[in-house]
Amino acid sequence: EHKRAAIALVGEFCQSTSTDYSNMVPAIFKDLVKRFSESDDKVALQQAWNSIASLCKAMKPEGMVPHLETVRNMLKAVASDAKYRLKTDDDRANYVLPGLCLPKSLDPFLPFYQYALMNGTPEQRESAALGLGELVDLTSEASL
């Protein structure tokens, strides 16, 4: 219950505050995306997704582009940790992040990945292109 309440509060904060918290985006994102691999608590999983959606919407695409590499690294780290805990190679090869298997799960990510592809530096464009591929790899077919 406390975890769910904390996740919901983070989403409300991101949505409602007028305070500049852009320097805290990596820490907030890190804590929320960790919940993407926890398939046993569907409510917390949905709340984490809602909070990430609020964060990405509040920051606007251009505000999230500087954090693109952090976002990619966090998603890869969470997926890698979850894969490590699986027992078979087949399970590892077919692993998808539960948080990216929700309806419209890529919606918070696509605007800033697209913005980076269209308006970013060459490094940001490359990172966005690689990141899109990683998102697709970690998302179920039904959610795509």
Image: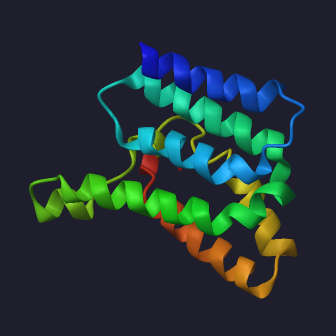
Residue 70 place in picture, x, y as percent: 59, 63
Name the residue rendered at 25%, 64% in the picture: 93
Depth check, front residue: 114 or 59? 59
Residue 74, horizontal then vertical, whole percent: 49, 58
Residue at the spot x=21%, y=59% of the render? 84
Left or right: 120 as drawn, with respect to 51: right
In the current view of this chain or complex, which residue is farthest to the left?
87
Does the image show residue 143?
no
Q: State left or right for residue 41 relative to residue 60.
A: left
Q: Is residue 130 left or right of residue 139?
A: right
Identify the colour scheme used.
rainbow
Q: On the rendered image, what quadrant is the N terminus found in?
A: top left
What residue sits 79% from the left and 40% below the top?
Answer: 57
- Residue 31: in sight, yes or no? yes
Q: Position of residue 94 (x, y in %)?
A: 27, 59
- Residue pictured at 78% horizontal, 50% vertical: 22
Q: Quadrant of residue 49?
A: top right
In the image: residue 63, left or right of residue 47:
right
Please determine whether, in this image, residue 46 is positioned above or below residue 139. above
**Looking at the image, residue 57 lies above or below residue 87:** above
Q: Where residue 83 appears, x then y in whole percent?
A: 25, 57
